[in-house]
Image (cartoon, rainbow, N blue to C red):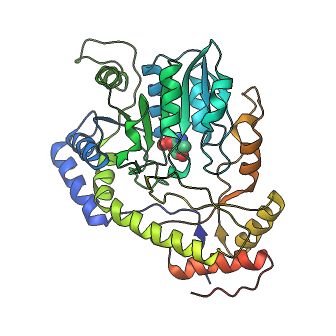
Amino acid sequence: MHMNINVTKSYLPPLEEYVAYLSGVWDRVYLTNAGPLVVELEKQLREYLGVKHLFFVNNGTIALQIAIKALELQGEVITTPFSYVATTSSLVWEGCKPVFVDIDSKTLCLDPTLIEAAITPQTVAIMATHVYGNPCDLEAIEEIAVRRKLRVIYDAAHAFGVTYKDNSVLNYGDISTLSFHATKLFHTVEGGAIVTDNDELAHKISYMRNFGHNGPEAFWGVGVNGKSSEFHAAMGLCVLPRVDELIRRRKEISERYDRLLADTPLTRPRIHDHTRYNYSYYPTLLPSEEVLLQVRDALNAQDITPRRYFYPSLNTLDYTDKQPAPVSEDVSVRVLCLPLYYGLEDEDVDRVCSTILQALGKEAAVSQ
Ligand SMILES: *Cc1c(COP(=O)(O)O)cnc(C)c1O
């Protein structure tokens, strides 16, 4: 009997390490509100990621919402239809109108050559996602944003530790947001962060994520509860020292998939040049949705659960204007993320690949 192989499995550190942090929490009886573990995690994250200001918050969606509020965005925001639903829903939630610009068919990130044509007098910002950790065309987006006086938010939920030309991708745009959800490469069970190198924005964000509190009795503007707890920070402090090892093993697994699936019609997104990648997902494009469903069913029959991610294309959501985005719509029906996590064994990868080869009608001759 095989164990179920899911698309992802949360990394858990040795229990004793987590418990050691908890015993400190029990000693202090300080559970939340910028406690010492939260402060320590923020410091370590700033150092590890190479960023100026970083605010640890309770999830990646509130990070996006606070980013939109901090930039006081009102009107149209140019965004990608190929992302997780939170990228679009946070804009709508904050009263902005998402204007979808299609993606590049190779990198699967927002196609910068289509941005200009979507700009109207109501356009205030661009919100783009580093899809699967693959950096957007940072330079092209920056050039347009400066020239057209638009703000830029990067949804960097997948891009933990990714660099472009040896600089963190989080240092581009006005604000970048991270998700530390349990399924992400680096996680704090639930969590996220807001990153900026702008001192004025950082000041605003620091108040916004804590109800606007300026001391116990005064307030500085409208805020929300974006704080996280000592328990979540403790998980982050246990996972962070292992991130390099997690990335190393994910790279190894990804390269094994590459080898075993090389001789198939499956294709892969192109990673942007000058990128240090984090191997956060293993997306693969099938020739058609029909073949995708065939392959998915064959995997499910073996108790292997890949994920259609991202699906559906966000421009098809009911609460949008449903502007067409043909590339995103095509990619979203053909893309499948294969299992990728620390702890996935080589034999598991081989079994996933032989099942795919069989479903594609090939000989299941998976050789090393
Ligand atoms: C995970 C994710 C989010 C949301 O983060 P949460 O921490 O789950 O709220 C937003 N955008 C993208 C691209 C994501 O993958």
Q: Quadrant of the C terminus?
A: bottom right
| Residue 93, quarter of picture | top right
| Residue 269, quarter of picture | bottom right
Residue 182 relative to residue 49: left or right:
right
The picture places residue 367, in percent across and down from the top left corner, at: 61, 88
Q: Residue furthest right?
A: 290
Q: Does residue 312 lie above or below 184 as drawn?
A: above
**Residue 254 versus residue 165: which sits nearer the camera?**
165
**Residue 303 versus residue 104: which sits nearer the camera?**
104
Q: Quadrant of the N terminus?
A: bottom right
The picture places residue 191, in percent across and down from the top left corner, at: 41, 43
Numbered label tally: 0
| Residue 128, quarter of picture | top right
Residue 347 relative to residue 263: left or right:
left
Q: Residue furthest left?
A: 27
Residue 337 in view: yes
The picture places residue 308, in percent across and down from the top left corner, at: 68, 55
Residue at x 70%, y 71% (from the top left corner): 299
Residue 294 relative to residue 202: left or right:
right
The picture places residue 221, in percent across and down from the top left corner, at: 36, 12
Q: Does residue 303 lie above or below 76 as drawn?
A: below
**Residue 136 versus residue 309: which sits nearer the camera?**
136
Q: Does residue 279 lie above or below 349 as drawn?
A: above
**Residue 286 versus residue 55: which sits nearer the camera?**
286
Residue at x 42%, y 47% (from the top left corner): 180
Residue at x 74%, y 62% (from the top left corner): 286
Q: Does residue 257 lie above or below 41 as drawn?
A: below
Residue 192 in view: no
Residue at x 32%, y 25% (from the top left corner): 198
